[in-house]
Image (cartoon, rainbow, N blue to C red):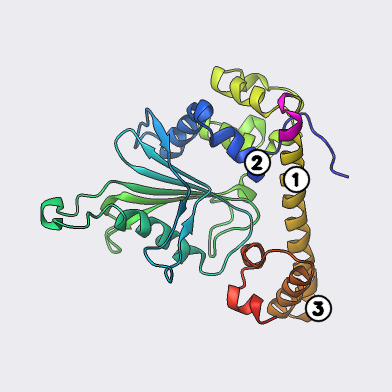
Amino acid sequence: MIKKTKYIDLMTDFGFKRIFGTDPNKDLLIAFLNEVFRGRKHIVDLVYNKNEHPGDTIYEGGAIFDLLCTGNDGEHFIIEVQRGRQENFKQRALFYTSRLISEQAPKGNRSQWAYNFSEVYLIALLEDFTLEDSPANDYLHDICLCNRDTGKIFYENLGYTYIELRKFVKTEAELTSELDNWLSLLKNMSSMDKIPLYLRKPIFEKLFNIAAYSSLTKEEKAMYDSSLKSKWDNKNVLDYAKQESKAEGILEGIKQTAKKMKQNGIEIKLIANITGLSLSEIEQL
């Protein structure tokens, strides 16, 4: 039985897209992104794009984003929620952003185009895992192309922002910026029973109103409950895999868990997303 809370969990698929993924609420996403960029960009408007980009041929894999938006200056924003570590996680991010760059190329007359493509940024919220070799207290990673020796930025308009929510452990008294406020809400909103005084601002009041469980329709409540159950099921699977890995070895434990999930009819792509195994490895189980 899932315990009902006053406010929905923003890190469920339903919760995240309800708050950030609809046109009437795009002011919330704009406000959040402006804080993520910390003054380097000022986004005035966004247009939501289709989140599925098929390959150019039937043999070429496509890309599916959680959210894909175009800013008022033509820049592209990919916003992703990652709950578990994936195989080739960094390469996947490069593939996604490269796809958005290559799609901007015209079919002909490229000399006139002169490779003048729009900016592309990926913002990834990491919920249940951290980046490899990441410092213990460093939860915000702002990455771009730079000179390895001097640190001078080589190219500004392709960027990757990774936010490790597991490491964000600030108390209310330690919140010092609007970005802190946003991250605290993303991580803790479902445990709140009212709007804190420090968040009594129009943008956050709107968010709390939309995120109230009581404001959902009957159909939306069913969708949210299903999304929340899926999130907790995934967490239980990961926890179980960790326990199994201690006894059987990390890889073998994960494979055994993936095998049980496959036997229970769970979609192979979802198993790959949770366990980090490749599709071919899972198909062979």
Residue that appears at 79% across and 73% down: 244
Rendered view: 147 above or below 116: below
Residue furthest right as drawn: 1
Dot 1 or dot 3: first in sequence order is 1
Of the residues shown, which amino acid type is indicated by label 2?
Phe
Numbered disc 3: secondary structure: helix
Residue 278 can be seen in this image = no
Q: Do the residues labelled 1 and 3 touch (CB within 8 Å)?
A: no
| Residue carrying label 2 | 14
Numbered disc 1: secondary structure: helix
Q: Where is residue 55 in the image (x, y as percent from the top left)?
A: 41, 62
> Disc 2 to disc 1, how far (Cα)?
9 Å
Q: Give the range drawn in magenta.
A: 215-220
Q: Position of residue 213 (x, y in %)?
A: 74, 29
Of the residues shown, which amino acid type is indicated by label 3?
Ala
> Number of numbered discs present?
3
| Residue carrying label 3 | 247
Numbered disc 2: secondary structure: helix
Quarter of the rendering occupied by the C terminus: bottom right
Residue that appears at 37% across and 27% down: 44
| Residue carrying label 1 | 226
Dominant SS type (magenta):
helix
Corner quadrant of residue 192:
top right
Of the residues shown, which amino acid type is indicated by label 1?
Ser
Q: Position of residue 29 (x, y in %)?
A: 49, 33
> Disc 2 to disc 3, how far (Cα)?
35 Å
Residue furthest front as drawn: 58
